[in-house]
Structure formats: structure tokens, C-alpha cells
Amino acid sequence: MKKLLLFSLCLCFTGLLNAQDKENKKKNDSIENLREVVISANVFFGSKFEARNRTGSSYYVSQKDLQKHNYTDINRVFREIPGVNIYEEDGFGLRPNISLRGTSPERSSKITIMEDGVLIAPAPYSAPAAYYFPSVGRMQAVEVLKGSSQVQYGPNTTGGAINFISSQIPEDFSGSLNANYGSFNTSNLHARVGNSYENVGYMIEYQNNRSDGFKNLDGGGDTGFNKDDLVAKFRLNTSANASIQQSLDLKFQYSDEVSDETYLGLTTDDYAADPYRRYAGSQRDQMNADHLQYMATHTLNFNDYFRITTTGYRNEFSRNWYKLNDVTVNGQNIGISNLLDNPNQFPEAYDVVTGGNSDANALALKNNNREYLSQGVQTKLDYHWATGKVSHDLEVGLRYHVDEEDRFQWVDDYQMINGQMQLSNAGIPGTDANRISDAKAFATHALYKLKYKKWTFTPGLRYENITLGRTNYGTEDLDRTGSDLSTRENKIDVFIPGVGFNYKTNPSLSFFGGVHKGFSPPGNSTGEDAEESINVELGSRFNFAGFQGEIVGFYNDYSNLLGSDLAATGGTGTLEQFNAGEVLVRGVELLLNYDLLKSNSDFRLPLSFAYTYTNTEFQNSFDSAVDIWGVVNEGDEMPYIPNHQFNAGISLEHNKFETHLSGRYMGEFRTMVGSGAIAANQKIESNFVVDLSAKYHLNEYLSLTANAINLLDNEYAVARVPAGLRPGHPMGIYGGISARF
């Protein structure tokens, strides 16, 4: 109610501002003419046109693309992009696991995630696992960058970078309201309003996304979530006739999430009987999270050729994921991952988890209570000039960044009585974990672009100076006096070079490629090595006979791959990283687009196809002592990376209506490192999922919408982590309205 009241007050305020505007401003965009170019200092490239003309592989998801299906699940958006590997976890995209070109997907920790050009993971250096992820439902566009020019956007430079572009301040008074409701009592409400004046602009946005969930909890109860997002932007700028153009953009973003999510999946037999079941032992599991972002961007435009952009930012994220961690019976303690992998070995513990009566303190629920801070300042200089027929672009960037993760955790013990969990022992905060991990990083980069006739070259260099530390107060010094203090520190300096090229033979055909160094920071253990690789790509973009697309081959040679001990991947949850040695990742990406009715002025029938082939292979043998990796032999494949995946789509578009049909194929993949045929208990079978959406435009301002996800209602598994098998989202049907003014 407080957030709705705040949004209502904001709407009243915007109405007063608009009443003061004496000028009659005319909207120039329509339902059929949505601008794709985003005018902002905090974007990678800003349009599909720019994406198609870069020296490296890139993909731009425009506002129109995002509106086709009205997805709030980032997994469903990214499935259309070649080179992106994903495994689902909760069915709603609350905690995605994203890989670019074969990087480790766990919690998206090996890619650089940004919102409006700013690092957005809770603690990008000290704890990069992305337990917070921006809500794609409020975004105006999404940029995905792979290839050599990603040295601009570290610290992770192996697979690529993702930039979410939030709703921009509009040029004229305008707003929108989108609301839908459907299966599993799932709803989404999204509203925004904004305006620009000669020297001032603003935008206010609110989104609520909620669901009762599609899983069936033993004994009853919700298995869904409720998530709110509030964004406010304010801009001050000089007049149009000022000799030097300046602007100051302020952004405030707040989100909160309450989700009844769990690490507890199902045994193989229970999944076969009912994939949407949830055990009684997960009835108290819940994630509570809050995120705050403050951001200020100053842009100084001296002329059309010289610009300096400076951004200060601060992200605060707190969460407590309260969830079942282990079970104790007859004095034996069993972790939930081990229990679900081997239920016949622990029949009494399995009985307790599924609702059987237990002794006191049998079920241990951990308060995974953590607070994160990420803040810094970054500046970027853009200078453009020409010498004869040669054009030059120089970008120089600097960033100073600090972040930390504060763990203050404890365990509560429960007893199972008649299928209901009752608290038998309340733990003391800080007695499970009491430590702070922190990082300080200075980064700088330079990217030079030279364009001569049909050739474009982009050499670049990035430098990272990183200090990673950990302060462990111990589980007895709850006041943090330092009486039982232990510390450790790891420092690293690294230069990350790269070079890319583009050769445009004619307007319909170009070739591009590049080579660069891949890098991911190590952990805070003294002497721990960083993740490093040499990455090569070669591709072509084409437009012949109506067919538009690209084909890219990539080759990533890891000299040292880092693995992480994450509970989210079935490990112990220490977050310790370990050297996994040499790995080769090779693959092909294919993108095709074609309009079957391109000559028809009333209808469009566009087709799209995206395919990714990924091959991974360890070049050495070792024993990781971590469950997801285990014993690794030379020639083994990485887990959770399918060899084959594709997405195909077809749309029928008219001025009065539009409909979109898409299908995603995900090939089988292994859940443990291995080679050859995949053992049944380590396999996720292939699946094919179809989504359908439709819109009917009543007029220029109002449309009716309908969506169906998993139209064929396929039952399919998506993962065996964090613990046990997990299902994808079943068929869901939704209807709603979309209004613009």
C-alpha cells in the first residue's frame, strides 16, 4: 500500500507539472513506429543498426522486441539470442543462471551485468553471484555484447557483457499502463509517466509482478512470489542554444521481493510421479530481498565530436533466504542435496522431509542473511575526428569501485509434527557465519576505432587493479570486537588487450572478427589465480534476397578456468573458488531473419531463427572435491552447457492486430562433469517449449493482449541444482490491456 500511495502522489505531481506546460506538444510515435535508438550516455551501442555494424558480435533487444510477448522472465527473452546458455531454476526467472559462449552459468557470476552502464550484481568483485537481477519487464531495451570490444565493460571479459537499459525520460508528456492476469493467480502491473521541458525532464515508473506459484506444496500453501519495482528519474539540462551542452541525470530505483522459493527439489522417482510437487520440509522456505540504487550522471558535450560522461552510483542489496539446509536423524546429519540424490540411503531423513514425524531439531533452516554494498564513480571520454578519408574514435574510461558482502547468518531448528514444521530451537544471529568479504578495484580502458573506406579496426586495452579481502570475526564474536579475528587478502594486476575488425564488402555483406584476452577475478584467498583465456571470433553479417542475419564461430582457450563452491549448484556454499585448469570452448552462432510478405503493405510475416552450437572440453585431469565438478578427466565436458539449442519464431502483423509464435529447443545436457553417454541421474533431457502471444489494437492508445507460455503444456526438467530435480513452468494463459497516452 505504501508503494501504491507513493506512486499515486508521483502521478499527482506530474499532473501539476504538465499543467504548467503552456506548449502543446505532439506525440510523434505510434503503435507501428516505436523508435529503437536510445539516446543515452549509459548504453553500449543503442540500436539494432549499431549492433549490426560493430567489429564484435552483439545483439540488441529493442522495445518492440520486448513488447511482443510482454515477458517478465529474462530466460524467455534471452532464448532468442545466439550464444546465450541458460538453465532455469524457479520457473519465473527470479534467479537466472546465464552463460555467454560457454562460461560457467551458475548465478550468472562469470558475465558482466549492468543496468544503464553501471555494474548491477550485488557485489560484482567480492561476491559476483547474481542473487539480485534487474526486472526485464520494466526495461526499454537490452544489449548483449560478445567479442573483443567487451574489454570496455569488465571485470568479466571472457563470455561477454549484458546491459539493461531502463525506461528513458520521454521528450513529450506521455505514459503507459499495462496490466494482465492469468494462470496461478499471476498478475503484472506496469505503469509509467514522464515529460520533458526546456531544461527539466522526469520519469516515474512502477511495476508489480506476483504469482501464487505453480508448484503444489504438501499440506497446502503458496509457492509463488510478490515483487515490486519503483523507478524515478530527473534531468536538468542546459538550453538548446548553450555553447556547451550539459545535463545532470538523477536516478532512484527501489525493489523488494518476497518469494516462497526453495533449494529443495525432488528425487527422480517423485519427479516422475508429480514434477510440480513440493515437499513439506520446504514449507517455511522464503526469500526476502530489498534493492536500492542511487545514480547520478553528468554529461558534458563540448561539441558533436567531444563528450565527457561521469557517473556516480551506489547499490544496496539485502536479503535473507530462509531455507532448509540439512536434516539430522539418529545423530546423522545429511545435506539436502546428498539426501535427494540418495533417498534410499537415508530413508528416515527422506521420511522427515516429506512430512513424517521427527524428533526435535531434526530440520535445520538457515537464515542466509546477507547485506551487499556496491558503489563507485566512473568517467568516460569520447572524442571523434577525421584526417582526410580516415575517421577516428577514441574512448577512454576510468572507474573506481568498492563493494562488500556482509554475512551474518544463523540456523533455526524445527520438528516435523503431522506434516507441519514447528520451531524447536531459535538460533542466535551470527553463529553460523560472521564475516565480510570486500573488494577495491581501479579499472581503466582505452578503445580506438579507425575507419578507412571498407575497413574498421578497434584495438583496445583494459587494466584492472583489484584488492580482494575477507574479515572473519568468527561465530563467537557476535559484537565484532576482533577477539577472534582472521583476515586474508589477494591482489591482482592485469592488462586485458583486444582487437577487432570489420570489412564491409558492400551494403549487403560484411566480415568481422577479433581476438582478446578473457578474464574473471579470483577469490580472496592469497595466491589464488584469476580466470584467463584467449578468445577468438570470426563471423559474417549478410542481407541477401530478403534474408538478413549473421554467422559467427568462436574459440575460447582457457589457461585457467575457475570453479566456485556454491550451494546454488549443489556445493557446500563456502563460495571458495578453485583452479580448474585448461578448457577449450568452441562453437557456432547463427541468426536468420526473413519477411515472407515483405512486398505487402498491409501485412508482415517475419520469420526468425537463432541457433547455438557449443562444445566444451577439459584439457587436464583433477579432483575438485566439489560435488558439481567432482573428479575431472581430460576430455570431459562442462556441466549445464548443451551442445545444441535453437529458437524459431513467426509473427503475423497488421495495423489492427499482431500475433507471435515462438518455439525453443534446448538440447540435453549433463549436470556433472563427464564425457560420453550421460548417466540417467546426471542428465537433463532435451525439451521443446512453445509460446504464443496476440494483441488487438482497439485504437492508437488502447490494445487488448493475450499470452500463452508453454502452449503445449510440456513437462520438462530444467536442473538438478541446488538440490534435486526442478520443473519448468507449465502452460499458463494470460489476458490484459495495454494503454498509452
Image (tube, rainbow, N blue to C red):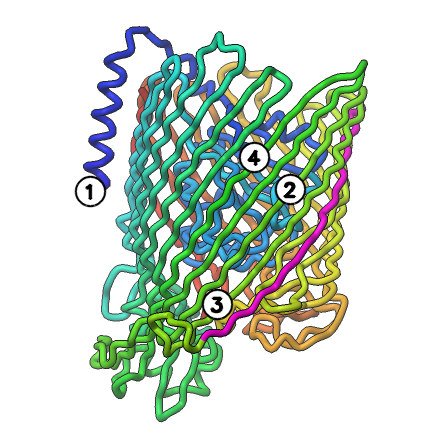
Q: Which residues are magenta?
A: 485-505
Q: Main secondary structure of the magenta part?
A: strand
Q: Is residue 174 above or below residue 720?
A: above
User: What kind of residue is marked 1?
Assistant: Lys
Task: State the residue position of label 2.
Answer: 444
The quadrant where residue 397 appears: top right
Instruction: Report helix, strand or loop for mark 2.
Output: strand
Instruction: Report helix, strand or loop for mark 1.
Output: helix
Instruction: Report helix, strand or loop for mark 3.
Output: strand
- Seen at 62% across and 29% down, the residue is 381
First reached walking from the N terminus: tag 3 or tag 1: 1
Coordinates of residue 518 in the picture (x, y in percent) = 70, 51
First reached walking from the N terminus: tag 4 or tag 3: 4
Distance between mark 1 and mark 4 Cα atoms: 36 Å
- Between label 1 and label 2, give the one nearer the viewer: 2
Task: State the residue position of label 4.
Answer: 379
- Seen at 38% across and 39% down, the residue is 707
Task: State the residue position of label 1.
Answer: 2
Distance between mark 4 and mark 3 Cα atoms: 31 Å
Task: State the residue position of label 3.
Answer: 471
User: What kind of residue is marked 2?
Assistant: Thr
